[in-house]
Amino acid sequence: MKWLFPRSDATAYEAAESRRSLVPADLALVVAFVAVALAVLLVWNPASAPIRGLVGLPLLFLAPGYALVSVLFPRSADAVARDERWSRGDSTRLRSTVMAPSRHLGGSNASRHARGLTDAERLALSFGASLAVLPFFGLLIATVYGFSPVTVIVTVSAFVLGCSLLAFVRRLRVAPGDRYRLDPGSRFEAVRSAVSPHRSFALAVVNVVLAVSVLLALGTAGYALLAPQSGEAYTGVQLLTEDDSGEYVAAGYPDAIEPGESVPLTVAVENQEGTSMTYTLVVQQQHVVDGSIVDRTEVDRLQYDLADGETGYGDRTITPTVEDGQVRLVFMLFPDGNVPEEPTTSDAYRYTHLWIDVGDGA
């Protein structure tokens, strides 16, 4: 068979194939997309949910799986088909040799037994593999780092870039003529043939409906994950004390004190509003007699300047001015300094309270 291809022609063919497949366009697109996603989600960080979804959905549901599939299957489906015909020794043996001399001149035996994938199989497996690896990302992040948008984006991006590099190395170990290559022209023709009514009108309709259904399902799920819901933004206010080890606990409050005695407390304010916030905490003493408030007195005021996700701690020592009776200490939180002249719990954005008996009046 060597007379069919002189050494110089075979070498020239292999060199041309090597140049065409040296830089894999699909992996280059994946790396470029990850760079764009990092710039949009971490640097720009737009508040628009559609923009975040447009970048975040492929980053979560397509890129990790595609990079992993590229590592596992570096060869094209055509190369595998040629190997199968060669192993059967049928009439296509000569033609397979003519079409891919580089494989028989320089390809390894191991590469000829690798499994190849069609484009449709690669796409389907990419979605499936992405959904399969996301739980492992969640376990890793929850165990090592703790959940936040930054840790999720960085972890997924690092996985995609690492797998893309490994996939590139794997393809270099395959004969140039057998490497998977992205060919948009032939892919477009395959899609057009799949939806062409001349082939089968019913089959074309089914293919279109299936594709649209998958896109809608992924879009709906991704939007629910990426678009912040109004109920997710909140501010928390909590009364804490220190235990014997110096840790903050939501317990250990005094329920009775002597006149003039102070109540040491730590007021924790947590900002989960999605943006930086400034809060004013108003501490009000309410003297209660027979279940009715007979007097309201402001006894303290404190300001918190918190970034999104930050928790501020204010150590306070509250001294009720009531000599005898039942007192309710109310801690009312107002954002952006919007404190009424006579604040009440109905005006407060958030509030909590603590009941204390002073002297023997209770």
Image (spheres, helix red, strand yellow):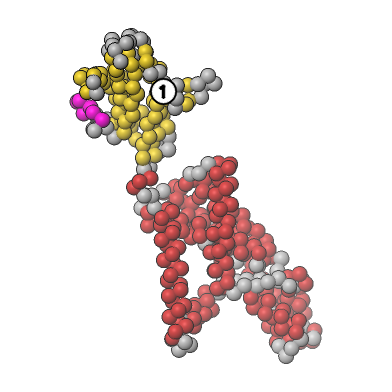
| Residue 214, horizontal then vertical, whole percent | 46, 68
Quadrant the N terminus occupies: bottom right
Q: Look at mark 1 in the image and give the residue it sits on.
A: 266
**Image quadrant of residue 277?**
top left
- Taking depth in this image into account, of 62 and 169 the one nearest to the observer is 62
**Which of 78/57 is in front?**
57
* Residue at x 56%, y 51% (from the top left corner): 137
As for residue 343 lying within the magenta part, the answer is yes
User: What secondary structure predominates along the stretch shown in magenta?
Assistant: loop
Tell whether 87 sits left or right of 286.
right
Of 285 and 281, nearer the camera is 285
Pick whichever, 186 or 126, lies toward us: 126
Vertical placement of 10 versus 336: above or below?
below
Among the 4 quarters of the image, the one containing residue 323: top left
Start-end of magenta stretch: 340-345
Q: Position of residue 325 (x, y in %)?
A: 28, 14
Q: Secondary structure at mark 1?
A: strand
